[in-house]
Amino acid sequence: MELQFVAIKNFLSRSLVFSGALLITSTAFSPICLASSNKIYIKESQIKKNNINLNNAIASGRAVSPATINLVKQYEGFRSNAYIDTSGYPVIGYGQSKIDGRKVRMGLRISRAKADAELVKQLYHIQRLVESKVKVKLNPNQLGALTSLVYNAGLRVVTNSTLVRKLNAGNYAGAADEFLRWNKANQGGRLVPLAGLTKRRRAERQLFLTPYK
């Protein structure tokens, strides 16, 4: 099986992926919820500490719903030319720092169709990790809302958060309200609420609460 690096918007650095499942990065885990242009580092010790079952993550899998994809696209935006994001890395498309396993470099261009395909793959990886940590049933809208949140805010959402603790206790309404708390960015060492993140969290909460037919 091939080991490759893939870019996931919610992580501050490159994440080592084995058969599509997040495995390790080379830096320490941050316990802070960061802005959408940032990413959260996770290393192997955190995978073990949080009991992430990679086999389950690899084995499970539902197709990413159109509602999930559209929500992420709406709030991430698209750029066809590579640019430097606030974490200091070149990114492209919907904030991907890797395309086809290759590091994005300045001067690179990407079609919307290619960026769309890469986005779906990344959301699928995240969705399977979400399913490996949530112990209650999720309909596609609930799963999609959580996937969007993790894509934006980081894996801590499903490894160490009140949101997932409430969800795994069967408190769906309480878990929905927890989305609104993930609206802060680290600015100058302080966590500051951002209007854009607040708007996105409300949209994710709404998706989570929308009955699936």
Image: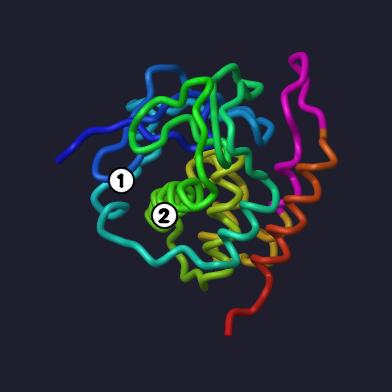
Residue placed under numbered mark 2 in the picture: 124
The quarter of the displayed image where residue 202 is located: bottom right
Residue drawn at the location 64% of the way across and 65% of the way down? 208
Residue drawn at the location 42% of the way across and 32% of the way down? 98
Question: What is the x, y in percent for residue 99?
Answer: 41, 36
Residue 133 in view? no
Residue 191, magenta (yes or no):
yes
Residue 178, above or below 187: below
Q: Pointers 2 and 1 in contact (CB under 8 A)?
A: yes
Q: Residue furthest bottom?
A: 213
Question: What is the x, y in percent for residue 196?
Answer: 80, 42
Q: Give the residues in magenta.
A: 178-192
The quadrant in which the C terminus is found is bottom right
* Type of the residue with mark 2: Tyr
In this rendering, the count of numbered labels is: 2
Please state which of residues 79 and 189 is positioned toward the viewer in this rendering.
Answer: 79
Residue placed under numbered mark 1 in the picture: 20
Q: Which mark is residue 170?
A: none
